[in-house]
Image (spheres, rainbow, N blue to C red):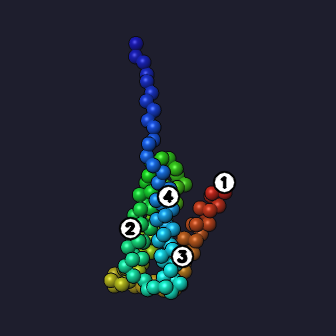
Amino acid sequence: MISESTTHLKDTTGNPAPLGLLGFGMTTVLLNLHNAGFFELNTMILAMGICYGGVAQIIAGIMEWRKGNTFATTAFTSYGLFWLSLVATIVFAKFGWAAPSTPTAMGAYLLAWGLFTAVMFIGTLY
């Protein structure tokens, strides 16, 4: 006689949300300090955008995916890629790899992300 058994694995990994939230928040604060005129755009902001705002949030998103949390996966990976793409728009222009973004183009880019944020916010209400 063959009997079936079921094994239940307990998820013992930590909560990745603090990593994702801090990655976005701290990078945003530094960029806004630049926008307020406290210091010029420099490697500190770009490095934060790549490493903490970008890569760390993507890692948090992947960890949320492993936990089955679709909303947090979408939020963290999307905002991580936002920071990487924002840094790329700056760096590509500085290296001459692409033309600098016009104010209109940058406005459209930020509007698209603003709409994404609005949709994500509305998603939290349901």
- Residue furthest front in the image: 38
Label 3, secondary structure: give it.
helix
Label 2, secondary structure: give it.
helix
**Location of residue 7 by image quarter:** top left
**Is label 3 or label 4 in front?**
4
Residue 74 percent across, percent down from the top left = 51, 58
Residue 14 percent across, percent down from the top left = 45, 49
Of the numbered discs 3 and 4, the one sitting upstream in the chain is: 4
Of the numbered discs 2 and 4, the one sitting upstream in the chain is: 4
Q: Which residue is mark 1?
A: 126
Residue 16 percent across, percent down from the top left = 47, 54
Of the numbered discs 1 and 4, the one sitting upstream in the chain is: 4
Q: Which residue is mark 3?
A: 110
**Is label 1 or label 2 in front?**
2
Mark 3 to mark 1 CA distance (whole Å): 25 Å
Say what amino acid the circle numbered 3 marks: Leu
Mark 1 to mark 2 CA distance (whole Å): 32 Å
Q: Which residue is mark 2?
A: 51
Say what amino acid the circle numbered 4 marks: Pro
Q: Which residue is mark 4?
A: 18
Q: Residue at x 57, y 66 (%)?
A: 116
Mark 3 to mark 4 CA distance (whole Å): 24 Å
Label 4, secondary structure: give it.
helix
Q: Residues within 10 Å of mark 3 (few under 14, many from 20)?
A: some
Label 1, secondary structure: give it.
loop
